[in-house]
Amino acid sequence: MILILTPNIEPESHVYQLLTTHLSRLPDIELRIHREQGLEQMLTEIHLIGNTSAIPTEDMKDLPGVERVVRVSEEYRILGRHRDDHRSSHFNYQGLQFGQDTLHIFAGLCAVDTAEYVELMMRALRDNGQVCTRMGAYKPRTSPYSFQGHGKDCLPYVFELAGKYGIKVIAMEVTHESHIDEIHRALRLTGEPTGVMLQIGTRNTQNFELLKFVGRQKDFPVLLKRGFGITLSESLNAAEYLASEGNSKVVFGLRGVKTKLGDPHRNSLDFAHVSVVKRLTRMPVCVDPSHSVGSRSRGPEGILDIMHATAQGGIAGANMVLVDFHPDPNRALVDGPQALLLEELPHFLEDVEIARKAFEKRTAALARYASELQTVAA
Ligand code: PEP
Ligand code: MN
């Protein structure tokens, strides 16, 4: 059960003290407080954990300082959708809004290799009106002998170049909690020229200690990739780990699942789950066509499979696209074969726009048919 308090309630206030004293006396119920500073107001939720079925909703509604009560199901308590749950599904970061009705494109390098390539990438993004990117500094590799990423050494120039080209948010994978400190330090050192969305990769979806650590910090939003060999529900529970520790600024990333049945693609595309994740949770949903498809193969009409995959996500209402580009894929140290070229960026962006427009048209068509049916029924 979640009690949504009146906005801007101060923890020191008499009302708040009265309320929490009363709640702490409820037998076998644990309280977890979630406080979120929104753009205009401070929102506070008190989560009652335990057997709340015997607690009448009306009693809770009448308590001082309580604006609304949401009875949550067991699953995905914080990030899930529940009956009569009108909580916002948006969060703001670096002046950008992320929600189930927005769309952001994070095109960039799978792995940072040289400052020159980072600059070429960022310049191309700026020239094409983009303010987000992806840059891998810490790379989880199958072989211990493969390039592991430049780690903290590349962060200062990545952040400075981002600032120079007006990039506001960089999606960057972290594989250990110490990486977050390193990111903080490099951002401070360079004067906070940009922002970072921490990425938890598919190999770490169920690294619960990492999830808890990342969930306990609220400075950076998180992109959690779906685990490639676990069920969707298990991956959604992993996202809930982040939120249960305090950080509910979470984007859920679909990136294909590992099964030989997806051959010749690197993974089996799961973008039909865009609407499933949006229905079950309030998280914005990201699609990663690069790691799903894994090559530059084309359909007979000439369109890249990666662009077909992106369009499938876009036409289903995806809220974020994470995609690999590289100025010179033959020289890329990681995932060159799936990288798109900088010259392909304008076409890629136009293609995403076409898919997004198609999604909007589909939604409008549904609304029209629904209202016609209502008129007929009346
Ligand atoms: C990546 O985005 O660089 C990556 C390694 O993705 P995934 O965790 O989905 O394999
Ligand atoms: Mn990669």
Image (cartoon, grey):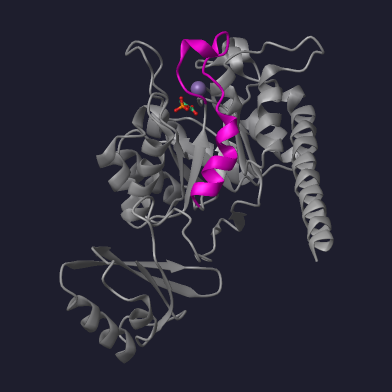
User: Where is residue 251 shown, x and y percent of the image?
Assistant: 50, 45
As rendered, which of 299 and 230 lies closer to the eye? 230
> Quadrant of the image for the C terminus?
bottom right
Q: Residue at x 39, y 34 (%)?
A: 152
Q: Is residue 334 above or below residue 289?
A: above
Does residue 34 appear left or right of residue 360 in this picture? left
User: Where is residue 116 shown, x and y percent of the image?
Assistant: 60, 25
Name the image quarter holding residue 245: bottom left
User: Where is residue 57 shown, x and y percent of the image?
Assistant: 37, 75
Q: Is residue 178 above or below residue 271?
A: below
As rendered, which of 47 and 71 lies closer to the eye? 71
Q: Please identify the residue farthest to the front as the structure is shown.
A: 377
Q: Is residue 257 magenta?
A: yes
Does residue 12 appear left or right of residue 338 in this picture? left
User: Where is residue 343 shown, x and y percent of the image?
Assistant: 76, 23
> Quadrant of the image for the N terminus?
bottom left
Q: Residue at x 32, y 43 (%)?
A: 211
Q: Which residues lie in the magenta part? A: 256-281
Q: Is residue 86 visible?
A: yes
Does residue 95 appear left or right of residue 300 in this picture? left
How many discs mark residues in the rendered view?
0
Q: Is residue 160 visible?
A: no
Q: Residue at x 55, y 74 (%)?
A: 40
As rendered, which of 261 and 151 lies closer to the eye? 261
Q: Is residue 128 magenta?
A: no
